[in-house]
Each structure stands twice: as C-alpha cells, then as structure tokens.
Image (tube, rainbow, N blue to C red):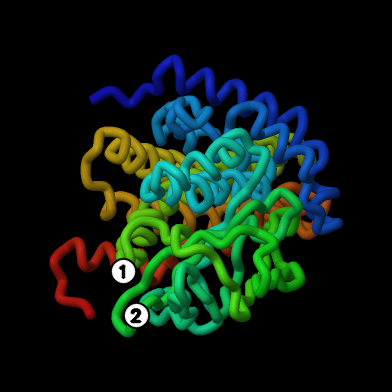
Amino acid sequence: MDLDFTEEHRAVRGMVREYAKDRIAPNAEQWDADHHFPTEVVREMGELGLFGITADEEWGGAGADFTSLCIAIEEIARVDQSMAITLEAGVGLGINPIHEFGSDAQKAEWLPDLVAGRALAGFGLTEPGAGSDAGATATKAVLDGDEWVINGSKAFITNSGTEMTSLVTITARTGPDEISTILVPAGTDGFIVEPAYRKMGWRASDTHGLTFDDARVPKANLLGEQGKGFHQFLSTLDDGRVAIAAMAVGVLQSCLDESVEYANDRYAFGRPIGSNQAIAFKCADIEVMTHAARLLTYKAAWLKDMGRPFKQEAAIAKLYATESAVTATRDATQIFGGAGFMDETLVARHYRDAKVLEIGEGTSEIQRLVISRGLGLPLR
C-alpha cells in the first residue's frame, strides 16, 4: 500500500499553498467582515486552472484526478473556507453535473467558461421544504411546447447570484413520480435571485434563495434523461462529500498549526501554556483527528480515482472529518482563550465557518443513515 502523493499531487499542493498564503490569507478577514465576494480573486483562481483541475482537456481542463482537486480545496480551506467552498461548489456542483450528464451541445455552450473560471454555476437542490428529504422536491417544470415552465423556490444555493454566475442547474418535478434536472441560465425571465443571506460563517461566499415564477427555458435544457434527476444528484453528492471532507481536513490542519504555535508562544505563570497537559493534550487530540480525517478523505478520493465504489467511504470521511473539524475549532478557540473569541483570530473564523460542514451536502445524520444502510441494516 502506497500512501504517498505523486509528484503531480505535490506540485498542486505547493502551487495552491503559495497562492492561498500570498493572495487569500491576507484578505480573508476583511472579506469575512464585509460579507464581500472577491470576484477578482475567484477569476484568478480560474486563471491558475483550479476550476478546471478535473475537467477534460477538450473543455480547457487539466484532466487531473479527483485527488488533485481535494488537495487544492484542502489548501485553500486552511486559510479561508469561503474561497474553498466557492471552488468546491464551482467544480462539484457547477461543472461536474454538466460534465458528467450533459449533451455535447450543453458541454460546448457552458463548460469552456466554467472550466476557465470566467463564469460560475450553482446547483439548486435544497428547498424550504426539501433538504435532507430531497425526494420532497416541490419545484415543478411543465412542458409547454418546446419550453419548460418552472415554478417553485430553492434555498441556500451557493454561487447562484454573483456577477460571474452564468446558470443554475436545478432539480424539478417533471411528473408525479419523477424528478429531472434542468439548466436555467442567469437572466431568464421569471428566475429571481433573492437577496444574499447574512450568515454565521462562510460570509465571503455567495449564497442566495432562488424563486422561479413561470420561468421558461428551452426543452433542450433538460440535463440527461427525463426522470433521472434523483440519480444524478445522488452521484453529485457522493463526490461533494469527499470534497467537503477535504475542506474539513484543511480546517483541522490550520487549527493544529495555529494551536501549536500559540501554545509555544503564549506564556502564563512564567512558562509556555503548551507545557501544561491540559493544553498539550488538546493539541495531541487535534493531531490525531487531522491524521485520521486525512487518511479517510484521501482513501475515498483514491477509490473514486480508481473507478471503484466509494459511497460508503465518502459518507464515513464526510462524517468523521466534519465533526472533527467542529471539535477542533472549539478546542483551538479554548486554547487561544480570550484571543480566540476575537474575530481577527483565524481560529475564531474557523469556529464560525466549520459548523456548516456538518450540514452542507448531506448532514451528519444523513451520513449515518448512508453508513447504516451500507452495513445492510433495514433502515427506512
């Protein structure tokens, strides 16, 4: 068993780490405070090829493996989760559904700009009454001649309202017992982007509710086969769970680095606080969680790259890594004491940001349900 990354993987890590340190880290605190989506930086990430890491060369991508994408997400998450989720959603929820299920015409129309990072796409799955219970989708799309007429609403949709957003892929009920996936271009009449949410965390990422009021799109905007939307978004979420786990690994590593440095530098009672077992053991626990989460995450990514089943491993990685990240951010904040309660401290921002890792792209409860079913238990 070879647990080493390849030379290509190490090159990706080095390049993204340097960029994140030089361009994102110095600005992330202010972006967070201002709830500012830094369009110019997202475009720079596109110019670096980050949105096109896994896309086929035919569409301007690098054709690299999924592990490379996870490495890039991990490195950005170490300094700013908002930009990490912008990349993760831009690739996993924006590009991948079109890349995997789109027609040649759809790929030719949308992928070049998305892959190059000149545009972003969102994925409209969650609704006010349909989150974990995605089968309860209420948004409807009805054929009227050569057009789909869409009515309904979506909630908490990432990358859906920026000046870079070119389309949103949505799930909609196209029959009594079927859900399909449809591409809705930005600017479509009847497609209303609601005001941005004010969030506890991920404040520099773009998140909106969406409303569809007799929004009309061509019949040809159906993504893949009619009635296959449920299968499509389940496949999309399996990939996303591994990528979210990679975000959590980045958070864990950052909390470890910050905590060890602070425990060495901060003195109390005439000695570094890291000389106290109460602090040292917290750092040790974060190290254990980081190590385990990284192994689980990259095992799942490797399985995907090998073309092997990975649904169970994706759920395990997502569950463990995200819950560990929430624990680690709480412990890191405690290590920092009063300083950890201040917004200008990185661990404080990680603490606020990390909670949603347990919620997005499948809650911890849903991961436990997936894992239980994988064990053959007869859960509903």
The amino acid sitting under disc 2 is Gly
Question: Relative to 22, is 177 on the left or the right?
Answer: left
In the depicted view, which residue is nearer to us: 91 or 334? Answer: 91
Q: CA distance from mark 1 to mark 2?
A: 8 Å
The amino acid sitting under disc 1 is Gly
- Please name the residue that numbered disc 2 is placed on: 175
Residue at left offset 57%, top offset 47%: 90
In what element is the residue under mark 2? strand
In the depicted view, which residue is nearer to us: 284 or 254? Answer: 254
- The image position of residue 216, as x and y in percent, is 57, 71
| Badge 2: residue crowd in 10 Å (few <14, some 14–19, many ≥20) | few
Q: Is residue 275 something one can see in this rendering? A: no
Compared to 67, does 246 lie above or below? below
- The image position of residue 314, as x and y in percent, is 34, 51
Residue at left offset 49%, top offset 79%: 139
- Please name the residue that numbered disc 1 is placed on: 227
- The image position of residue 29, as x and y in percent, is 81, 48
Quadrant containing the N terminus in the rendered view: top left
